[in-house]
Image: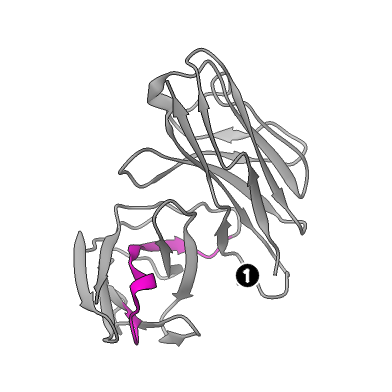
Amino acid sequence: DAKTTQPTSMDCAEGRAANLPCNHSTISGNEYVYWYRQIHSQGPQYIIHGLKNNETNEMASLIITEDRKSSTLILPHATLRDTAVYYCIVRVNNYGQNFVFGPGTRLSVLP
Amino acid sequence: SAVISQKPSRDICQRGTSLTIQCQVDSQVTMMFWYRQQPGQSLTLIATANQGSEATYESGFVIDKFPISRPNLTFSTLTVSNMSPEDSSIYLCSVVAQGLAGWATDTQYFGPGTRLTVL
């Protein structure tokens, strides 16, 4: 799997948009970008994934640059419950392929 | 959508003993994985639990230490054998489903984890 680079930590004010960047400059053409988050002491939670088009669901939006070398996860209105470690993973969309987790970004939503 | 549960949710064990962790899914799933998360660290894959055959272990993990069973498409166990304090971690099972309503195809979903402390 291609490696990703994320900031170690970020702060965001409650109610504001949280924009979490991820660099994946060596991503292959058949690799997707996945985002998970892990709230303290819980199992990782799937958020969203995409290949090259921007994606949106009820949790977040994923913006992937045209060259696919980087992406941004957007939480439009961050709440205190969004405080978590956010993981960006690139992976071939194959059910047999496991996910390789890096250190992620620790997002703190501040009141 | 399917639910993933793990038992026990947490345990405190003495060194030299073994603990078996169960992972139950309420729908049939294609793939099941076991991960370890040591304190303050990210997740590390232990093995892929294969239905009807021996698990596939990652480098650094061996069957004698982490025997895994997967008797059917909804259940798996991980045993942590001859435990030492270094085995204190959160152990997580994850599944990949295909064709289940409400699940993103080929996406991995995680159980709540088992927090193990070895004294």
The x and y percentages for residue A98 are 51, 51
Residue appearing at x 62%, y 26% in the figure? B67
Total numbered circles: 1
What is the quadrant of the C terminus of chain B in the image?
A: top left
State left or right for residue A106 relative to residue B116. left
The x and y percentages for residue A92 are 49, 62
Residue appearing at x 54%, y 21% in the figure? B65
What is the quadrant of the N terminus of chain B in the image?
A: bottom right
Decide: is A69 above or below A64. Answer: above
Q: Is residue A82 magenta?
A: yes
Q: Nearer the viewer, residue A12 or B63?
A: A12
Decide: is B42 above or below A108. Answer: above
Looking at the rendered structure, the kind of residue marked 1 is: Thr
Residue appearing at x 43%, y 27% in the figure? B87
Decide: is A22 above or below A52. Answer: above
State left or right for residue A23 relative to residue B33. left
The x and y percentages for residue A81 are 39, 71
The x and y percentages for residue B10 are 54, 38
Crowding around mark 1 (Cα neighbors within 10 Å: few <14, some 14 to 19, many 20+) is: some
Residue extending furthest toward the top: B16
Q: Is residue A11 magenta?
A: no
Decide: is A22 above or below B16. Answer: below
| Colour logic | one colour
> In the rendered structure, which segment of residues is drawn in magenta?
A73-94
Element marked by disc 1: loop
**Residue of label 1:** B105
The residue marked by circle 1 belongs to what chain?
Answer: B
- Residue A91 in which image quadrant: bottom left
State left or right for residue B50 relative to residue B39. right
